[in-house]
Image (spheres, rainbow, N blue to C red):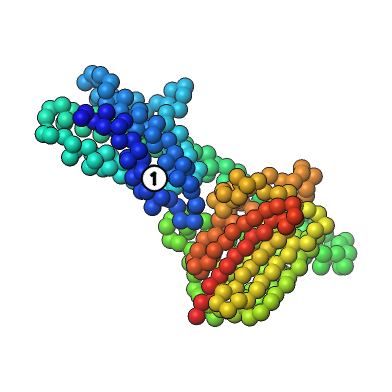
Amino acid sequence: MNLSAFIRSHMTQILAEWTAFAKKAAPVGGEMSNLALTDHAAAILCAIAIDIETRQSKQQQYEKSQGDEVDSGEEESAAAIHGRLRQASNFSLLELSSEFRALRATVLRLWLPLVPQMSDTTIYEMVRFNEAIDQALAESIVTFSAKAERTRDLFLAVLGHDLRAPLATISLVGDLLMRPELPPEQVATLGERAKRGAKLMSAMVADLLGYTRLQMGAGMPTARAPVDALAVCQAAVADARAMYPTSSFVFRPDGNLTGSFDSVRLQQLVTNLLTNAAQYSAKGRDVTLDAVGLEDAITIRVTNFGAVIPEAFLKTIFQPLVQLAPDSEEDTRPKTSLGLGLFIAQETVAAHNGKITVTSSDADGTVFAVDFPRGR
């Protein structure tokens, strides 16, 4: 059986192995369906089969080996779309490349036992197959890299935009404090505004540093020790109130909240959830923090009432650089999110062997729920 015919007739078996490998290679914490994992694999394999059957001159073969044929043209190839979607699903370039390496090995491993003996035709088909795989990988890398560059540029634009407001506030406060005619009773108010701006920037920088460490493969640094989560949650509520003084925060602790946690990371986690809730909460509605101590775990729930998050968006909300649209253009509440807060929260929970989920409805509001093993 020639290789192109084998690929078509054994498509189901090849795709099953592709999906199984993609599931292992998928980023931690990203729950993807088999359909999403398989993605455009069938179309990629069909394109490879067609490429093997297409006559090719030595000049065309040379151009392909030099990458001159990596051109999406007017219509994106299946491999190009695959690369773009894998970047959107938070795969790394190494994980993307490993998929094609596994696909190459799978097809050859399944096909070669069916070849009665090696011949010039067999060798030729293997060469053409490897060329086609390399071509598909190159097309995927091109769109993956382009999407990554656009994401990076967007992130830098958001960072510059979100830092500008608190910086302008601190600069204005400095100018006002330098005026000799400034009434003494206004000094405390101005100082509070400067402190709030500094907290906003500090939250952004903390998220940025955490994201950078994770992207470099260093992991979320944690130093666990006996901690009373009650005090940590109280400090997080104080931080959230300082950043959102017009929002109402309600803290409801219950039971024993002591355990083995990283207090710094835990406070950052709760603060991120509270400020995220305050940012998207309807005006006049409370943001509620519930912390409950169970026998072997503690649970934390942050609830707010605002616009319902669409079901499709709930699946991507913990990915980096994902932001909800504001409720309205007139909303002047400070924006602390770089699209990293929930991503950092998820990684912090994972470092504590916990689980974080989100639900959103008109009746129950938007609820971020964290379950932490208490630790010993």
Can residue 86 be seen in the rendering of this structure? no
Q: Nearer the viewer, residue 47 or 9?
A: 9
Q: Nearer the viewer, residue 95 or 190?
A: 95
Give how far across and how far down residue 327 sits, in percent: 74, 46
Does residue 57 sit above or below 354 in this rendering?
A: above
What residue would you read off at disc 1? Answer: 19
Q: Quadrant of the N terminus?
A: top left
Q: Nearer the viewer, residue 51 or 113?
A: 113
Q: Residues within 10 Å of mark 1 (few under 14, many from 20)?
A: many
Give how far across and how far down residue 106 sits, in percent: 27, 42
- Disc tally is 1
Does residue 271 sit above or below 57 in this rendering?
A: below
Can residue 108 be seen in the rendering of this structure? yes
Residue 292: quadrant of the picture: bottom right
Q: Secondary structure at mark 1?
A: helix
Give how far across and how far down residue 161 sits, in percent: 65, 46
Instruction: Say which residue appears at 52% left-offset and 56% top-offset.
Output: 211
Instruction: Say which residue appears at 57% left-offset and 46% top-offset.
Output: 155
Give how far across and how far down residue 254 sits, in percent: 69, 77
Q: Is residue 41 left or right of residue 332?
A: left
Q: Is residue 335 left or right of residue 7?
A: right
Task: Name the amino acid, label 1.
Answer: Thr
Does residue 162 sit above or below 201 in this rendering?
A: above
Instruction: Say which residue appears at 51% left-offset and 69% top-offset.
Output: 352
Residue 41: quadrant of the picture: top left
Instruction: Say which residue appears at 47% left-offset and 38% top-offset.
Output: 84
Q: Nearer the viewer, residue 113 or 210?
A: 113
